[in-house]
């Protein structure tokens, strides 16, 4: 985490209110504002909103921002959300996408398990995240999805295409992202 100016109490209160706003526009405009605010003070309100936000879009907005607040608590909350079958698929997908950018070793296992989820959005974002992580253990499941899962995600493409893209990422295996013992990001949380 880089050092940025801490948010004032007023900014923090506005952020909490905005994330829990009545409209999707307010929630995601607040999320975009918070995206570059890597202030540790956001950990608790983001985690709380992810767990208890009134509407799925409030919880999804919190998951979106959580990729920037990389603490053990935020990553753990994202992992729980991806695995929570009672949570809205949009929120679970946003949490999976966030794990592509802020994760630990356990995150890989959570995403691998959820590649077989009944919901296409969850499968899509788990495939994306595992491709970004260059997770070799995902190759068999991604190969299966690439061959069979033609379900299209609104605004994107099919799960099969995302699985193919993930497989390409794994093949290339960006050496700056991976080391002999796994993902460099996984060892710090």
Image (cartoon, rainbow, N blue to C red):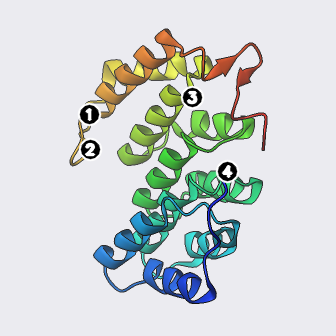
Residue 104 vs 132, above or below: the answer is: below
How far across and how far down the image is residue 60, in percent?
Answer: 45, 64
Q: Residues within 10 Å of mark 3 (few under 14, many from 20)?
A: many
* Identity of the residue drawn at 44% across and 74% down: 58
Q: Which residue is mark 2?
A: 153
Q: Residues within 10 Å of mark 4 (few under 14, many from 20)?
A: few
Mark pair 1, 3: CA separation:
20 Å
Q: Which residue is mark 4?
A: 1
Label 2 sits on a secondary structure element that is loop
Label 3 sits on a secondary structure element that is helix
Q: Which residue is mark 3?
A: 133
The quadrant in which residue 51 appears is bottom right
Q: Which residue is mark 1?
A: 158
Upstream in the sequence, badge 2 or badge 3?
3
Tell me if 130 is positioned left or right of 156 in this view. right
Mark pair 4, 2: CA separation:
32 Å
How far across and how far down the image is residue 68, in percent?
Answer: 57, 54
């Amino acid at each position: 985490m880089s050092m940025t100016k801490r948010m004032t109490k007023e900014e923090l209160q506005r952020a909490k209110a905005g994330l829990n706003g009545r409209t999707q526009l307010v929630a995601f405009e607040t999320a975009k504002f918070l995206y570059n605010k890597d202030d540790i003070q956001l950990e608790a309100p983001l985690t709380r909103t992810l767990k208890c936000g009134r509407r799925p879009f409030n919880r999804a907005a919190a998951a979106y921002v959580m990729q920037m607040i990389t603490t053990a608590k935020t990553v753990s909350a994202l992992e729980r959300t991806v695995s929570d079958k009672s949570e809205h698929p949009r929120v679970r997908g946003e949490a999976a996408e966030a794990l592509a950018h802020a994760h630990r070793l356990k995150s890989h296992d959570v995403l691998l398990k959820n590649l077989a989820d009944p919901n296409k959005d969850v499968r899509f974002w788990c495939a994306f995240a595992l491709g970004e992580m260059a997770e070799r253990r995902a190759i068999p499941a991604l190969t299966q999805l690439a061959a069979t899962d033609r379900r299209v995600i609104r605004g994107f493409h099919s799960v099969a295409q995302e699985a193919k893209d993930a497989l390409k990422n794994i093949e290339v295996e960006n050496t700056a992202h991976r080391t002999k013992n796994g993902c460099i990001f996984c060892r710090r949380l």
